[in-house]
Amino acid sequence: AGAVTGPLLAYEVMTAFFLEAGFLGIMLFGWNKVGPKMHFFATLMVAIGTIISMFWILSSNSWMQTPQGFAIEAGRVIPIDWWAIVFNPSFLYRLAHMGMAAFLVSALLVAATGGWLLLQGRRDP
């Protein structure tokens, strides 16, 4: 299975992880060093990187649950069709489920934080 899951996680590192790591420093430590537009852009890039990361990790996990697009030769898993591996039968359901769950949890966290601050009497914008 390493011939399939290894490249999928390597794609995650090469696309999403480097994107997130590069802009996370600007987002966290650049409050007084960059302008508000650059800070917003860095935050947006971290969010996009997280979504790309979700895509690749869920693709790997979905393949482990419903494997497609491979052959077994001499006891080894050999990738045959990467399209079938990435977009296996359960992938879109898992992606929709986790995407909606992540956005819902984020929205509820923001709402809860705002509600808590209002209860504390803080009215900062």
Image (tube, rainbow, N blue to C red):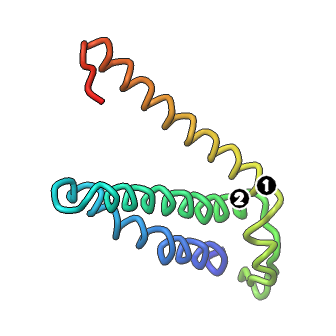
Rounded to the nearest whole Å, what is the CA distance between mark 2 and mark 1?
A: 6 Å
Which type of secondary structure does the marked residue at label 1 adopt? loop
Whichever of callouts 2 and 1 sits on the residue coming sooner in the sequence is 2
Q: Quadrant of residue 60?
A: bottom right
Q: In which quarter of the image is residue 51?
A: bottom right
Vertical position of residue 102 compared to residue 83: above or below: above
- Name which residue type carries label 1: Ser
Task: Please identify the quadrant where the N terminus is shown.
Answer: bottom right
Relative depth, front residue between 54 and 80? 54
Q: Residue at x 21, y 53 (%)?
A: 31
Vertical position of residue 103 compared to residue 118: above or below: below
Q: In this view, does 112 lie to the left or right of 8?
A: left
Q: Name the residue under label 1.
A: 90
> What is the number of the mark on residue 62?
2
Q: Residue at x 81, y 81 (%)?
A: 81
Q: Position of residue 76 (x, y in %)?
A: 71, 83
Vertical position of residue 110 compared to residue 69: above or below: above
Q: Residue at x 69, y 43 (%)?
A: 97
